[in-house]
Image (cartoon, rainbow, N blue to C red):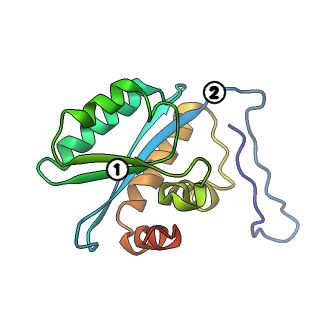
């Protein structure tokens, strides 16, 4: 839960002090999807946070089911990294039973191709920087608020896609 610390402005002689909880192994795990319409105009960010939990196959399956509900009758292609939970049999079964639902994987180590990595980098380096959380619930609230506000910054989301060199 240690905050990312960057340079900041402060009045002369008043050094900013960040108080944090040390030796805490609590965490907030996140899963997200950037969805682009076939005409490449509309873009949506879907995400879910898990407090004090890791992302495993069960969480991935629940997230993918939510995506299927949000995008009910349109073709859906998911491209994701090679996290073990993404390749789990229970997750892959979701795609074998559905028409017009496809999944592909990035090369073994290619975070620069994944636009969601740029979403996380932006959130960590901009709205969440220099903000130490008092507890894990506070961190989750701040991350959720920052993620929700990012949903409406369509130009920025398009920039993440363009920077990923997928297009």
Residue 61 against residue 145 in the figure, above or below: above
How would you rate the neighbour count of disc 2 (Cα within 10 Å): few for under 14, some for 14-19, many for 20 or more?
A: few
Cα distance, mark 1 to mark 2?
30 Å
Q: Which label belongs to residue 26?
A: 2
First-in-chain label (1 vs 2)? 2
Tell me: 131 left or right of 122.
right
Q: Which label belongs to residue 78?
A: 1
Q: For the C terminus, which image quadrant?
A: bottom left
How would you rate the neighbour count of disc 1 (Cα within 10 Å): few for under 14, some for 14-19, many for 20 or more?
A: some
Tell me: 42 left or right of 87.
left
Residue 61 against residue 70 in the figure, above or below: above
Residue 57 against residue 41 in the figure, above or below: above
Q: For the N terminus, which image quadrant?
A: top right
Q: Residue at x 49, y 40 (%)?
A: 30
**Residue 82 percent coordinates (x, y):** 52, 41
Q: Residue at x 67, y 45 (%)?
A: 132
Q: Nearer the viewer, residue 130 or 113?
A: 113
**Residue 115 percent coordinates (x, y):** 48, 60
Q: Nearer the viewer, residue 15 or 138?
A: 138
**Residue 34 percent coordinates (x, y):** 37, 57
**Quick one: SS at disc 1?**
strand
Quadrant housing residue 96: top left
Residue at the far right in the pictured view: 13
Q: Nearer the viewer, residue 69 or 146?
A: 69
Tell me: 51 left or right of 149.
right
Q: Residue at x 41, y 72 (%)?
A: 158
């Amino acid at each position: 839960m240690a905050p990312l610390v960057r340079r900041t402005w402060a009045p002369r002689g008043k050094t900013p002090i960040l108080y944090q909880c040390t030796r805490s192994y609590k965490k907030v795990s996140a899963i997200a999807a950037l969805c682009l319409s076939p005409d490449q105009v509309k873009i949506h960010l879907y995400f879910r946070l898990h407090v004090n939990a890791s992302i495993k196959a069960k969480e991935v399956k629940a997230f993918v089911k939510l995506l299927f509900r949000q995008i009910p009758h349109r073709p859906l292609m998911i491209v994701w990294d090679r996290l073990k939970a993404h390749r789990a049999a229970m997750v892959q079964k979701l795609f074998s039973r559905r028409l017009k639902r496809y999944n592909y994987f990035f090369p073994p180590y290619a975070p620069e191709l994944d636009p969601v990595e740029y979403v996380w980098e932006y959130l960590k380096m901009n709205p969440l920087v220099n903000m130490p959380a008092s507890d894990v619930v506070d961190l989750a609230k701040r991350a959720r608020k920052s993620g929700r506000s990012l949903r409406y910054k369509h130009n920025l989301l398009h920039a993440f896609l363009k920077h990923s060199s997928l297009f």
